[in-house]
Amino acid sequence: MFEAGQFNLFKEQLDMESFKVLMDVDSGFFLFQGLLYLLSLSGAVMMWNLRKTGFHFYAVAQILLLIVYELYFTGAPFPLMPLIITIIFILLYFRNLKYLK
C-alpha cells in the first residue's frame, strides 16, 4: 500500500529506512508480539483482581517481549530504556506481591 502511494499524507513524517525495516521483518515477529502483549495484559488484569499468578504472567511476557525484539532485530541497538522500564515495573509489582492471593 505504501509503494502504491496510499500513504502520501504521512510521507513527510515517515522515515523511509525505518519503514522498510518493518516491512522486511518476518510476520512471526508481529504474531509473537501480539501474543505476548495479550499475555501481559491478562497478567495485569489478574493482578488487578489480586491474583498472584498475574504477576508471573506479566513478568514473563515483558521479559520475552525484549528477547523477541532482540531475536528479530539483531542489528538494532540494545533496547536499554525499555529494559530499565521493564525492570522498574517488575520490581514495583514484586514489592506488592504480598498483597496478592
Image (spheres, rainbow, N blue to C red):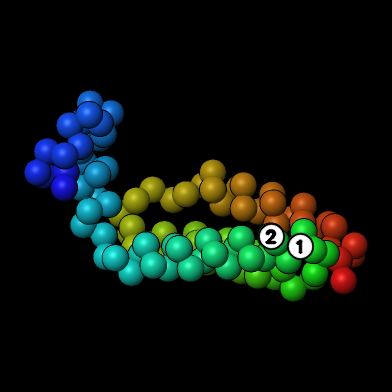
Q: Residue at x 67, y 65 (%)?
A: 43
Residue 8 lies in quadrant:
top left
Amino acid type shown at disc 2: Ala
In the visual, does 15 lie left or right of 82? left
* Residue located beneath label 1 in the image: 47
Q: Nearer the viewer, residue 99 or 71?
A: 99
* Residue located beneath label 2 in the image: 44
Q: Is residue 28 above or below residue 6?
A: below
Question: Horizontal and vertical percent for residue 30?
Answer: 37, 62
Pointer 2: residues within 10 angstroms few (<14), some, or many (20+)? many
Q: Nearer the viewer, residue 39 or 29?
A: 39
Q: Residue at x 76, y 62 (%)?
A: 47
Question: How far, Cα to Cα, is label 2 from label 1?
Answer: 5 Å
Question: Horizontal and vertical percent for residue 59?
Answer: 65, 64
In the visual, does 55 lie left or right of 73? right
Residue 95 lies in quadrant:
bottom right
Dot 1: element:
helix
Quadrant where the C terminus lies? bottom right
Amino acid type shown at disc 1: Met
**Which residue lies most toward the left here?**
4
In the visual, does 53 lie left or right of 58? right
* Residue 71 in sight here: no
Q: Residue at x 26, y 43 (%)?
A: 18
Dot 2: element:
helix
Q: Are marks 2 and 1 in contact (CB under 8 Å)?
A: yes
Pointer 1: residues within 10 angstroms few (<14), some, or many (20+)? many
Question: Horizontal and vertical percent for residue 64?
Answer: 52, 66
Count of number-bearing discs: 2
Question: Horizontal and vertical percent for residue 2?
Answer: 16, 43
Q: Residue at x 20, y 47 (%)?
A: 20
